[in-house]
Image (cartoon, helix red, strand yellow):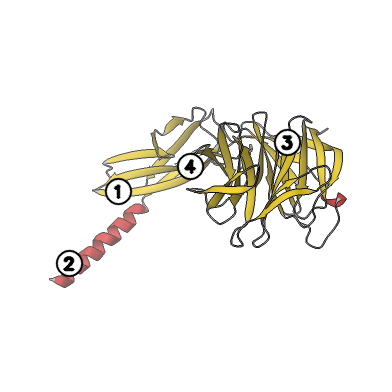
């Protein structure tokens, strides 16, 4: 009797396995790329005409139909999920789609306004101006620090070291408090700006790492090395929303140091041997511009540990940007212009 039960169970398992292969979820558009004004069209193929009890479709956790207007949904990478109920079995099928920008990013270049000395031992991770003083975060375990710097002379007014277990990352200043991320420590730090004294720490939630940080005066924006930027509550630093950074073609990964300037997020991207910045619309994740910073790295001292461009800060009174890199001997004051 036990043998028959075992054989029947194996038979039913085989039937269920075979049934899963009889359905296929297909997106009508071969590229699987859409813009926010498109209608999403897809089809579930029932190869052997099984009697279906019901089908439910979801996009990003919300129910949709086979012809679903995207209704200006935020840009990003999403899953269409079909839940098919057949003979009391629930089968699930997933297709990945991208909602991309309807327009190409504009191309920008730069004009050097000034060159200032910069500590070439600083593995720069974050830059921020506050009351005409430059604050800088540096990385590497055992060498990470937070500094107050005279941007003209390069003199370090004050410096505190992070615990050796932490790798310092991006910073931002909001309501007279400075916030600094750590890379893989799953933790950020809040400081008093006058004495660089740690007041409290805060934990990350769904974001995996800490890379860049900026704020719009009400909210914080945090990058984690992916194509996502997380929106944080200013008081608690809890992750309350996110955007996905997209061009008209694909997602832009390795979003690094961030700076908020006149309603846009300016960001470094961690690209080896490429000096590139991007301009992001924080409302939908659209890449509005790409900044070609090539040539800057060749103007600094070519030390053995010279690394990539990283660090971008905006000086509101001078209306210029300040950029540098990891172990760069210079801090560049630049104006960004449309590329000719």
**Viewer-nearest residue: 298 or 13:** 298
Which element is circle 4 on?
loop
Farthest residue toward the left?
1
> CB atoms at circles 4 and 2 under 8 Å apart?
no
Distance from disc 1 to disc 3, alpha carbons, whole Å, reads: 54 Å
Q: Give the label on residue 5, or none.
A: 2
> CB atoms at circles 2 and 1 under 8 Å apart?
no
The residue singled out by tag 4 in the image is 238
x then y, percent, for residue 37 = 54, 27
Mark 4 or 1: in front is: 4
Distance from disc 4 to disc 3, alpha carbons, whole Å, reads: 26 Å
The residue singled out by tag 3 in the image is 314
Distance from disc 2 to disc 3, alpha carbons, whole Å, reads: 72 Å
Where's the N terminus, which quadrant?
bottom left
Mark 4 or 2: in front is: 4
- Res. 56 visible in picture: yes
The residue singled out by tag 1 in the image is 90
x then y, percent, for residue 66 = 41, 34
Disc on the earlier residue, 4 or 1? 1
**Viewer-nearest residue: 192 or 42:** 192
């Amino acid at each position: 009797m036990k043998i028959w039960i075992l054989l029947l169970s194996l038979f039913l398992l085989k039937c269920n396995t075979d049934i899963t292969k009889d359905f296929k979820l297909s997106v009508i558009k071969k590229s699987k790329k859409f813009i926010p004004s498109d209608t999403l069209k897809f089809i579930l193929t029932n190869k052997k005409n099984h009697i279906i009890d019901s089908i439910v479709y979801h996009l990003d956790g919300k129910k949709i139909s086979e012809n679903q207007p995207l209704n200006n949904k935020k840009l990003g990478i999403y899953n269409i999920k079909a839940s098919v109920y057949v003979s009391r079995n629930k089968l699930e099928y997933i297709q990945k789609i991208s909602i991309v920008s309807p327009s190409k990013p504009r191309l920008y270049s730069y004009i050097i306004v000034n060159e200032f000395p910069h500590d070439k031992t600083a593995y720069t991770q974050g830059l921020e101006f506050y009351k005409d003083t430059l604050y800088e975060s540096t990385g590497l375990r055992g060498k990470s620090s937070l500094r107050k710097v005279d941007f003209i002379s390069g003199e370090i007014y004050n410096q505190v070291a992070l615990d050796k277990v932490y790798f310092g990352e991006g910073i931002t200043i909001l309501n007279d408090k400075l916030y600094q991320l750590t890379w893989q420590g799953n933790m950020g730090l809040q400081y008093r700006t006058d004495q660089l004294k740690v007041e409290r720490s805060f934990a990350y939630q769904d974001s995996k790492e800490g890379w860049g940080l900026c704020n719009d005066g009400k909210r914080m924006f945090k990058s984690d090395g992916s194509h996502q930027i997380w929106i944080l509550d200013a008081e608690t630093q809890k992750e309350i929303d996110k955007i996905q950074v997209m061009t008209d073609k694909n997602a832009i990964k390795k979003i690094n140091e961030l700076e908020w300037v006149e309603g846009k997020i300016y960001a470094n991207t961690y690209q080896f041997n490429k000096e590139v910045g991007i301009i992001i619309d924080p409302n939908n994740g659209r890449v509005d511009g790409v900044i070609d910073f090539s040539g800057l790295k060749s103007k600094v001292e070519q030390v053995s540990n010279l690394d990539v461009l990283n660090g971008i800060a905006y000086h509101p009174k001078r209306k210029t940007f300040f950029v540098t890199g990891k172990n760069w001997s210079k801090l560049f004051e630049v104006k960004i212009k449309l590329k000719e």
